[in-house]
Amino acid sequence: MDRIRSKYEYTPLDPTSQDIRLVTILPGKFDDPFQIKITHAPLFLLPPPVLEDKPARWPLDAIWRSLPQAWNARETLEGRVVFRNYDARYSSWDHPDPGFPRERYEVPPDADGRPSVDFEALSYTWGSPKIREKAIVVIAGEAEDAGKSGGGGGGGGFSRALGRGTGGGAQKIGIQGNLADAMRHLRYEDRSRVVWIDALCINQDDLEERGEQVKRMGLIYALARRVVAWLGPGSARSELAFARLAHLGRQIEHARDGTMFAAPGCAEGMWYSPRTALPWDADTWEAVFETCSRGWFGRLWIVQEMHLGRGGASVLQCGRGEIAWALFRRAVICVHAKQVGVPAKLWHKTQEIKFLCEHLADMPFADLLKNHHKRPCQDDRDKVYGLLSLAPPEISRHVSPDYGASRLEVYRSVFFALVKHERRLSLLPYSGQQYSSTSSSSSSSSSSFFTSTTKAATEEWPTWLPDWTRLVRVTSPHHVGFCASGASSCSGAKYVGPGRLQVAALYFASTSGVGAKLAVSDFADFRRAGKKLGLDRERGAAAPYPSRGTYRDAWLETLALGRVEDRHYGIGCPSLESLAAMVAAPEGTVSKEEKALSDGWKIWTTGRIDGCYLFSTQNGYVGMINGEPQQGDEIFVVLGCNMPMLLRPTASGEYEVIGDCYVQGIMDGEALFGSIPPPWTVQIGADADNRVRAWYYNEETAAIYRDHQRLQEVPLPLGWEEVKEWERTRADPLYCRRFHNKETGETINWDPRLSPEEFRGRGVPIETITLV
């Protein structure tokens, strides 16, 4: 070996090309010093092979129509079509008609083409930035040797030598501790291995290059032959967990629409059922918990790394042990769905991992930000940038990675990117005073390794802007289908800076009474909270509520945050009557209704309302908020926002955002359109895009409307007509309609009857308020 320079010097990547860097880990024994090569390689997709006279795969709905009665078709998380006979309850990879062409439902190899270079991509936790080891970067003769390196692929025919001083010699590059462990276990003794590793393939000191490569991350992971997720050194417990989870994963299939069923040819036909307990002993549960507690599962970047990779080939690795990502994700989703037998600590652990394992291609970007914002990353700006490759292009094109911008500027840019495309305030419910700089001594994350010196970094954080470095807990999750403002638009929203946002909103009520902070650690505490409200007494059951029903039902539905059978039929939620019986049961006893209630509902509900506050309003309504309300706070329904917002008036006449809130009786548009009288009810169900929405159902006539029934009486403004046929995408807001103006040619994604002007014309006092 020639002389070794002190530090490796990167040759700049051409920002106009698709070039990336790749690391070739040269062969060596486990404890040998590292020797690597770093090469440039053009990354692009070669066209797929021409398949003459081969019919293309049909869309899923077309495949479904080809099936005989009692059969349906689902698309698995990995994109395969599986056929299910729901009478006989068995599944098959084969169409029930033996003569049906397989090409109609199977995806041929290389259907989307193949990458120009063969490599793997590493997903790992950076850990401490302290350099533990140094690798020798081989320079001389690199281009010639790369083509002879053997089984790791490598693209020797196009690789170009990197680094300064290509006339001979080598340089050194620092390897952080966790990466060093991963590389030792990845290195082969007899052949080279070509891997994309972000810490080595991106010049981390070059902010401009970091921004450009972050834009390319989606392509890098999508074109990798597979993603290898390094969880850390192996152990007896990781081996046990991998074996049990792999076996469970082979017994089940999970479809992209959320359904779970027995896998074709499985040995355990009922393990998929939430009511079937798994036959695992205490050692197995502890091994699974310990493995799922590894630091890798909490990292933010892994979300896009695993979902952009080729799911059927990617693996998780502990030491030398591996489990296929496809098996692991199915197993974790199944464990989390179990209603019996799962230890509570593992249920909570799999709650976050489930968000990682779900099918994300149909998930709105706002939900991705919320579900994964708690995951740590070394740069606070990566709370957005680390998920940007998963955003629909309609959103991502408005946000360009810029590591010279402050955290506030980055989070504000994504807020307005959604406003610009969706014409909604989708991120407003994730904001609130408890997350703003006014309630914290610091406006930056303590975990950040990077800081911004731009002027915007010193701005006061507005209460209407979510701070993704903090724990953002909305009062109620939006997947339960609330639509307080209907399919209205935030077209009146306007940034009037500095830090001020004007919105169009309806004042509903002011708070008149605030209860103590709820402390709910288990379901017994839930029942005690109900008793304190008097819900176990006849008087509480009889008093009429302002919108409909009784105060007993209103408080019960508020404590359950709307997740009751009366609203969510057939998914295991308790009815209001059964909840009332549970609350009325004597202390220390368990009613038959509670025995029938799933553990999952109890854990979810108690965890959701713990730390919340109950409140009442001056006009007799009741509600709950995950924030600290005060008497005199005001409830508004903001146009373009699905949740009511609790705001606090300031001396200047502006408003601070306290947070989103649940107010029984106005969650489905009643504040804007009027109460929902019997026989009309609101039912929640999943649409064809798997997103949950509210439907207005007439129990006498069985009529179903997408709109509040009173809106049916309001004619469209002159010139407007509804577009009946259009394709919904995940870039659309939850409550989205298409309307076309025959006179102007304009097409909008909101109901023109719900503009501020139209509301005012019908006597609804919409006003313009300023949030600070």
Image: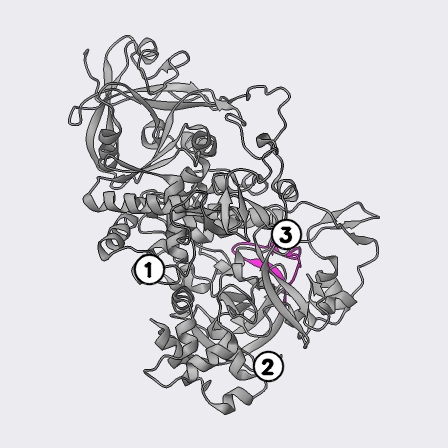
Q: Is residue 220 above or below residue 75?
A: above
Residue under label 3, please give it: 423
Q: In this picture, which residue range is highlighted in magenta?
A: 486-506
Q: Which residue is mark 1?
A: 342
Q: Based on the picture, tell me whether residue 724 belongs to the magenta stretch.
A: no
Tell me the SS state at disc 3. Answer: loop
Report x, y in % for residue 32: 16, 24
Which residue matches tag 2? 549
**Considering depth in this image, is 630 or 673 the residue closer to the camera?**
673
The CA span between labels 3 and 1 is 42 Å
Q: Given contact means CB atoms under 8 Å apart, are the residues at marks 2 and 3 in contact?
A: no
Give the crowd class for mark 1: few <14, some 14-19, many >=20 residues within 10 Å.
Answer: some
Q: Earlier in the sequence, mark 3 or mark 1?
A: 1
- Near-viewer residue (67 or 470): 67
Near mark 3 (Cα within 10 A), the count class, few <14, some 14-19 or many ≥20, is many
Instruction: Say what amino acid the circle numbered 1 marks.
Output: Val
